[in-house]
Image (cartoon, helix red, strand yellow):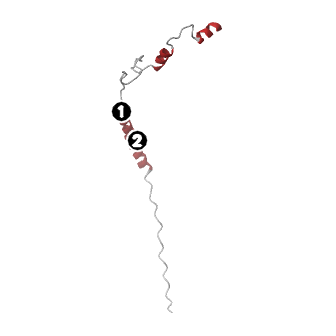
């Protein structure tokens, strides 16, 4: 037997962690992406706008109409449900007269 020293295994290097991008770089990327996304959403909203024309071909209710051209549903329902209602057959009018 020979008295040779046994070789020790070579030490393994420790894994080097990957550095995070600097904070300023991440912030810059966010500030660039934010207006791009907002612009894309605004463009898609602009494309989706559809003007609706109130007419017998598109809408069952065509009158009464507000100043901006939309249908006034409250006035339509009031007019429809008050057809044929008089003070004689209206219970609310009788109750109002009794309470003063």
Q: Nearer the viewer, residue 29 or 55?
A: 55
Q: In this view, does 8 lie to the left or right of 42?
A: right
SS class of the residue under badge 1?
A: helix
Coordinates of residue 46 in the picture (x, y in percent) = 36, 33
Q: Is residue 84 above or below residue 35?
A: above
Q: Is residue 100 visible?
A: no
SS class of the residue under badge 2?
A: helix
Coordinates of residue 83 in the picture (x, y in percent) = 49, 12
Q: Residue at x 41, y 49 (%)?
A: 25
Lower sequence index among marks 2 and 1: 2
**In the rendered image, which quarter is residue 91 located in?**
top right
Q: Residue at x 39, y 41 (%)?
A: 37
Tell me the crowding category of disc 2: few under 14, some 14 to 19, or many 20 or more residues within 10 angstroms, Cα based. Answer: few
- Contact between marks 2 and 1 (CB within 8 A): the answer is no
Q: Residue 34 carries which label?
A: 2
Split into 4 quadrants, where in the image is the C terminus?
A: top right
**Extreme bottom residue here?**
1
Coordinates of residue 94 in the picture (x, y in percent) = 61, 9
């Amino acid at each position: 037997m020979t008295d040779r020293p046994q070789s020790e295994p070579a030490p393994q290097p420790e894994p080097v962690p990957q550095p995070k991008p600097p904070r300023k770089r991440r912030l810059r990327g966010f500030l660039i992406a934010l207006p791009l996304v907002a612009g894309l959403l605004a463009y898609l909203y602009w494309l989706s706008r559809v003007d609706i024309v109130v007419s017998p071909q598109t809408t069952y209710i065509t009158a009464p109409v507000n100043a901006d051209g939309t249908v006034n549903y409250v006035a339509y329902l009031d007019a429809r449900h008050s057809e044929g209602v008089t003070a004689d057959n209206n219970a609310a009018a009788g109750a109002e007269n009794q309470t003063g």
